[in-house]
Amino acid sequence: MNNLIKTDVCIIGAGPSGSATSIMLSKEKIHHYIIDKAVFPRDKTCGDGLILYAYKSLKTLGEEIFNGFLEHPKILHSNSIRLHINNDLNINFKESKDRDMVISYAKRIDFDNFLVEKISNDFAFKEFGNGV
């Protein structure tokens, strides 16, 4: 057995929830461990659409992270969507100055890696790809 590590907080999984939790703990200067069985960047099966609530969640991580998300070259943003359900249904969102009303498309490999890269090295011990 490897060395036993004691910690108050251990995050299992570095997907969006785990990475966001790590970022918030780092803001509070709480040392923690985050582990994932995969090596990043890694891909996962997903519909790749981000719901509007994701914008509000990203804003809580800080302005720098939110703006980096908006400017990321592999994440697409739109203020309208078209659904094909029997007849065409067009939905247009009014784009506000804080961009709350926007739809995004991001492949999981890009979105998850974007968040993992924002995890603080000062407060988080990261261990990826060890078959956890």
Image (tube, rainbow, N blue to C red):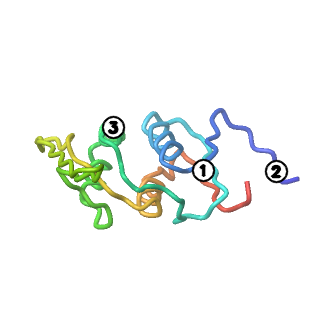
2 vs 3, front mark: 3
Q: Are marks 1 and 3 in contact (CB under 8 Å)?
A: no
Nearer to me, 25 or 78 = 78
Quick one: label 2 or label 1, which is nearer the N terminus? 2
- Residue lying at the far right of the rendered structure: 1
Disc 2, SS: loop
Q: Residues within 10 Å of mark 2 (few under 14, many from 20)?
A: few
**Residue corresponding to mark 3:** 53
Disc 1, SS: strand
Q: Relative to 4, is 10 on the left or the right? A: left
Question: What is the three-letter code of the residue carrying label 1?
Answer: Phe
Q: Residues within 10 Å of mark 3 (few under 14, many from 20)?
A: few
Disc 2 versus disc 3: distance between alpha carbons? Answer: 40 Å
Which residue corresponds to the image point at 30% horizontal and 49% vertical from the top-left? 85
Q: Relative to 128, is 103 on the left or the right? A: left
Question: What is the three-letter code of the residue carrying label 3?
Answer: Tyr
Disc 2 versus disc 1: distance between alpha carbons? Answer: 15 Å
Disc 1 versus disc 3: distance between alpha carbons? Answer: 28 Å
Labelled disc at residue 3: 2
Nearer to me, 45 or 89 = 89
Labelled disc at residue 107: none
**Residue corresponding to mark 1:** 125
1 vs 3, front mark: 3
Quick one: label 1 or label 3, which is nearer the N terminus? 3
Question: What is the three-letter code of the residue carrying label 2?
Answer: Asn
Quick one: label 2 or label 3, which is nearer the N terminus? 2
Q: Relative to 105, is 110 on the left or the right? A: right
**In this picture, is 33 found above or below 76?**
above
